[in-house]
Image: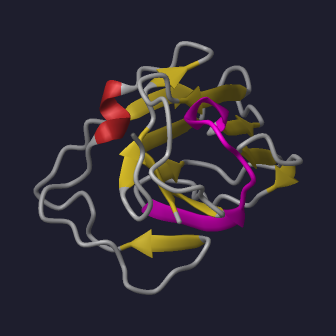
Amino acid sequence: MMELGKWYTFELSDNGTDILPLKDYKPGFVFPASYGTNIKLENYENNYVPNAFEYPKKTPFEDTFRFNSFADFNSKPNSATIRMIYKLDYIPQSVTMNMAENKLEHAVLIGNNNGKDWYLYSETITINIIDPSDLTFYLKIDKQNGKNFDIDYLAVRLD
């Protein structure tokens, strides 16, 4: 049973993204108290080698993440907060996201030329779902040959 107010990492990927590296983040890391769509994480790699999913951007990244081991919620959720620690070594021209099959939204992810900075993407959206299998996260990022996209952590919290 999924509980409100608890963070969950996704269990499945429709397009074969390795889920295991998305379940952890830097030991001892404290998420920023302030929320924003893209927050630069200072010194995130100091004394830490991320167990990250790295996607070489020869083709667009497109995947839907979901759950399969939960049958119910302890209470009906009204919102979901997505939390993703990522880095890009370029600024993507097009990013599309969708949570719980709401309408597609164009989002902004921050990137830089050296790909050394990690960012926290965090956003809360209203949802209207009755089954945990409806809790999905769709992400599509345009390609840029020779550039990379990394995710170190991807989770969702229901409220």
Q: Residue at x 42, y 61 (%)?
A: 117
The x, y position of residue 96, in whole percent, is: 80, 45
Q: Is residue 47 magenta?
A: no
Q: Which quarter of the picture shows residue 58?
A: top right
The x, y position of residue 14, in whole percent, is: 62, 17
Q: Residue furthest right?
A: 103
Q: Residue at x 44, y 51 (%)?
A: 74
- In front here: 143 or 99? 99
Q: How is the image coloured?
A: secondary structure
Q: Residue furthest top?
A: 16
Residues rendered magenta in the picture: 118-134
| Residue 21 higher or lower than 47, as above or below | above
Is 110 displayed left or right of 114 in the figure? right
Residue 84 is at least partly visible in this image:
no
The quarter of the image holding the N terminus is top left
Is 74 displayed left or right of 127 in the figure? left
| Residue 125 higher or lower than 90, as above or below | below
Residue 3 is at least partly visible in this image:
yes
Q: Residue at x 71, y 43 (%)?
A: 100
Is 100 displayed left or right of 45 in the figure? right
| Residue 153 higher or lower than 5, as above or below | above
Q: Disc count in the image?
A: 0
| Residue 33 higher or lower than 47, as above or below | below
Is 132 displayed left or right of 97 in the figure? left
The x, y position of residue 71, in whole percent, is: 48, 29
Q: Is residue 122 magenta?
A: yes
